[in-house]
Image (cartoon, grey):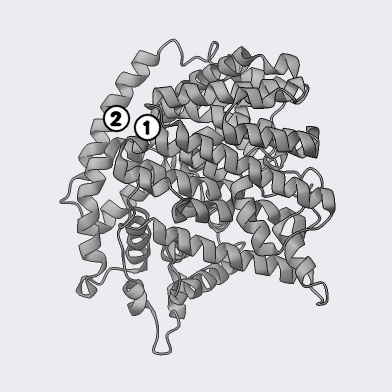
């Protein structure tokens, strides 16, 4: 069973974790934090002056894009909100004669922020036969923007699928034919389109590419560097809180399986609560994520089928007494889950009903998978996928986020969680399908434990299926799921912006966490996490 906790994400060694935990005591930035914050405040005001509404829409769109890529747009939410309607009015104005860069960049920025923009803004870039004009390939910046815009497509928007094929084809041909710096940037965006990325993990890359550009860029870059180092210190301190909480439970002393991967847990909480201003939520989110790790291990490796049935029933009843027939390690695990969940619920005004229902659902999904694997009988692929969306841990994590954001206090919002809403289910489906992609090419994860691809191939046992055809099928499912998730994120969405972002960030991270290098090792998440937490940016 693969969850948020899967070792496919690239676990961090104990030595590396302890280095992160103790780093903040020796970092040169700790002693002059007040000075850094003073400089950041000044830089914020300087950048704010660049966001005046009287600037050209093209200039405003480019600046907003830069602020987002550098992870500092959260300082300017009000200013950006004032600029977006102006950009929206201009992108649909055929008489303005803006080029491909503005059309594609504005389309992406607006849809990212919940504005519906019609694909008709691209009509003037197509010929009479409906194909994109070949001369557009001379505009590298415009083609990159078109490629990135294509990922915000909805079902039925075939034009954007064509835009992706058209732009990526020309851009790949350019790699090697242009100067190295441009070629590198093209390759990076082809592999890491902004909409499918976690901005904080890419900040250093964009800083490196824009350093020395001069003018307004230097003011923005200075703020980004200051902000990165200040946020890094804050994250280190949050991580120390998580480590202190985990050790206070005492589980690592009693259980061989109690891993101390709190850096990995914390990274997932950072993904879910990505806004730097959500410090408390990040610390609290790491706790249920730790239990997703722990319970996954119990079901996947350590518990017998009979023990797991009793454990699941105890979670469903939410009764400590129900665990009396279980071995000590399972009793302790349930008790820790029980106390931690009730503690979190107490901090958010007794909203534990959402947590309990979801913990029970997740345990039932784990139990179903255990039974399938024990019997050797895999279910139909759609049955597996529905169950796998729950066992992924994504609904568990996102429902915690929903309540931690205060949404659980509003009666009209709590009704949204009576069943798993589409925003969460599409996010979980993408996560599960990406996770299971590894089995198509030889099951590079920790052991063979069934997957959507396995079930799909079993259903078609009488039909020859190449690895390529199965992989293509999974990619098509992913593409449709992303289109549905995009639709949920447009303006009719009733959720808080931070919750919508969390629901997008989980599948975004899956694409990075479950991508493998030439040695078939999933190192991207590990390396980027250590860089994010340990390596400050020179000022």
Residue 161 in the image: state x and y as whole percent: 50, 72
Provide the residue designation for mark 1: 222
**Left or right of 457 in this view: 109:** left
Residue 377 in the image: state x and y as whole percent: 81, 58
Mark 2 vs 1, N-terminal side? 2
Q: Which mark is residue 43?
A: 2
Q: For this rendering, which residue is in front, 59 or 480?
A: 480
Secondary element type, mark 2: helix
Q: Residue at x 21, y 56 (%)?
A: 85
Q: For this rendering, which residue is in front, 123 or 418?
A: 418
Badge 1 crowding class, 10 Å Cα cut-off, few under 14, some 14 to 19, many 20 or more, is some
Q: Residue at x 43, y 80 (%)?
A: 133
Q: Is residue 269 above or below residue 151?
A: above
Residue 344 in the image: state x and y as whole percent: 46, 25
Q: Residue furthest bottom?
A: 128
Q: Are marks 2 and 1 in contact (CB under 8 Å)?
A: yes
Q: Residue at x 73, y 14 (%)?
A: 253
């Amino acid at each position: 069973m693969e969850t948020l906790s899967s070792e496919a994400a690239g676990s961090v060694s104990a030595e590396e974790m302890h280095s992160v935990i103790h780093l903040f005591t020796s970092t040169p930035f700790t002693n002059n934090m007040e000075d850094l914050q003073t400089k950041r405040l000044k830089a914020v005001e300087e950048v704010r002056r660049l966001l005046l509404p009287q600037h050209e829409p093209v200039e405003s769109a480019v600046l907003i894009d830069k602020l987002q890529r550098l992870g500092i747009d959260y300082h300017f939410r009000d200013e950006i909100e004032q600029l977006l309607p102006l950009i929206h009015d201009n992108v649909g104005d055929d008489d303005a004669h803006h080029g491909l860069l503005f059309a594609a960049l504005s389309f992406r920025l607006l849809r990212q922020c919940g504005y519906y923009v019609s694909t008709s803004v691209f009509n003037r870039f197509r010929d009479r036969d409906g194909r994109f004009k070949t001369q557009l390939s001379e505009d590298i910046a415009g083609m990159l923007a078109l490629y990135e815009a294509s990922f915000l497509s909805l079902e039925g928007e075939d034009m954007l699928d064509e835009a992706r094929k058209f732009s990526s084809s020309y851009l790949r041909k350019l790699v090697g034919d242009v100067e190295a710096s441009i070629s590198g940037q093209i390759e990076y965006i082809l592999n890491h389109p902004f909409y499918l990325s976690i901005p904080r993990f890419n900040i250093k890359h964009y800083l490196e590419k824009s350093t020395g550009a001069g003018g307004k860029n230097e003011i923005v870059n200075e703020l980004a560097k200051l902000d990165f180092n200040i946020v890094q210190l804050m994250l280190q301190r949050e991580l120390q809180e998580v480590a202190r909480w985990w050790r206070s439970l005492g589980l690592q002393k009693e259980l061989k399986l109690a891993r101390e991967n709190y850096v990995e847990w914390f990274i997932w909480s950072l993904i879910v609560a990505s806004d730097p201003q959500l410090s408390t939520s990040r610390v609290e989110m790491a706790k249920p994520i730790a239990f997703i790790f722990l319970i996954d291990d119990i079901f996947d490796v350590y518990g017998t089928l009979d023990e797991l049935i009793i454990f699941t029933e105890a979670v469903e009843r939410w009764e400590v007494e129900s665990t009396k027939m279980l071995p000590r390690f399972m009793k302790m695990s349930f008790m820790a889950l029980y106390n931690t969940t009730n503690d979190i619920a107490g901090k958010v005004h007794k909203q534990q009903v959402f947590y309990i229902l979801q913990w029970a659902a997740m345990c039932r999904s784990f139990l179903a998978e255990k039974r399938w694997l024990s019997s050797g009988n895999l279910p139909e692929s759609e049955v597996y996928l529905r169950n796998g969306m729950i066992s992924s841990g994504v609904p568990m994590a996102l429902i915690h986020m929903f309540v931690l954001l205060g949404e659980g206090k509003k009666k009209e919002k709590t009704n949204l969680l009576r069943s798993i809403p589409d925003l969460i289910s599409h996010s979980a489906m993408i996560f599960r399908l990406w996770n299971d992609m590894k089995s198509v090419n030889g099951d590079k994860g920790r052991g063979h434990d069934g997957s959507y691809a396995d079930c799909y191939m079993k259903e078609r046992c009488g039909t020859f299926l190449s690895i390529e055809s199965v992989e293509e099928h999974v990619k098509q499912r992913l593409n449709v799921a992303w289109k549905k998730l995009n639709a949920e994120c447009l303006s009719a969405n009733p959720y808080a912006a931070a919750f919508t972002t969390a629901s997008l960030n989980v599948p975004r991270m899956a694409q990075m966490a479950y991508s493998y290098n030439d040695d078939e090792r999933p190192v991207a998440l590990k390396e980027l996490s250590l860089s994010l937490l340990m390596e400050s940016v020179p000022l």
